[in-house]
Image (cartoon, rainbow, N blue to C red):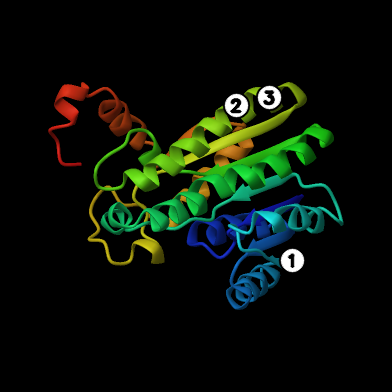
Amino acid sequence: MNIIIVGATSAMAQHTARRYAKAGNRFVLIARNAQKLTAVADDLRARGAECETLTLDINDLDAHAGCVSASIAAAAPDLLLMAHGTLPDQQACEQDTALMMQEFATNGSSSLALLNEYARVFEAKGSGSIVVITSVAGDRGRQSNYVYGAAKAAVSTYLSGLRNRLSKCGVSVIDIRPGFVDTPMTADFSKGALWAKPEQIAAGIEKAVAKKRNIVYLPGFWWAIMLIIRNIPEVIFKRLSL
């Protein structure tokens, strides 16, 4: 199987790749940091996978088309996993509009631009899976992280439309919505019972691909949590500190 991973140096992407590496699949790994990318590729090769690497600044939209072309040069992808992103400082974004828009681009519009390129590839092939890690934060705006949530909501809405389009030609579009995950990006946060390990998310992603799911909350209990949060009446919700 030919697998392309964007944001391949992220913890969730690495653990997902390791699960697929055991079957001797072929990877094209894409990320911004070449040094970290090399380390990830070496780890996967040691596990039996074939790997190529490409560097990309996800916010350089002019570079997207060339990166896509290079990533499919050897063979059309069977699986695309998009796992890049940052965790914005909400208060800093409130004070700096340029920073806010930069974070929205990194977590939102850059994904839409790259997906638009890859969608045509999968559509022409007529099979495969597009998997994007979004977030439960996109289900409803909360004062603690609504810049991040707005970006992820935009991606989820785009995926909904893309799924509607590509399902007709046999392509699965899977929206992975994790809750709290213990990764280097969240190293400064206090951890509790609701926190998951990236290994758990990786296992859920592999299962979602195998079953051709549509929207998957990981771990699964987040579906119930977000159902409650989405249905809190606005008159009550706006008084809460979430």
Q: Residue 165 shows which numbered tag?
A: 3
Residue at x 25% of width, y 47% of height: 144
Question: Which residue matches tag 1?
Answer: 51
Question: Which residue matches tag 2?
Answer: 161
User: Where, quadrant-wise, is the C terminus in this rendering?
Assistant: top left
- Quick one: 211 or 171, which is closer to the camera? 171
Residue at x 66% of width, y 32% of height: 172
Real-space CA distance between mark 3 and mark 1, rounded to the nearest whole angstrom = 31 Å
The amino acid type of the residue labelled 3 equals Arg
Q: Residues within 10 Å of mark 1 (few under 14, many from 20)?
A: many
Residue 34, compared with residue 86, is above or below; it is below
* Furthest residue toward right: 74
The amino acid type of the residue labelled 2 equals Gly
Q: Quadrant of residue 179?
A: top left
Residue at x 30% of width, y 53% of height: 90
- Helix, strand or loop at label 2? It is helix
- Quick one: 84 or 28, which is closer to the camera? 84
* Furthest residue toward bottom: 35
Real-space CA distance between mark 3 and mark 2, rounded to the nearest whole angstrom = 6 Å
- Helix, strand or loop at label 3? It is helix
**Disc 1 vs disc 2: Cβ atoms closer than 8 Å?**
no
Q: Position of residue 223 (x, y in %)?
A: 36, 32
The amino acid type of the residue labelled 1 equals Cys
Q: Is residue 194 left or right of residue 47?
A: left
Real-space CA distance between mark 1 and mark 2, rounded to the nearest whole angstrom = 31 Å
Residue 25 seen anywhere in this rendered image of the structure: no
**Disc 3 vs disc 1: Cβ atoms closer than 8 Å?**
no
Mark toward the start of the polypeptide (3 vs 1): 1
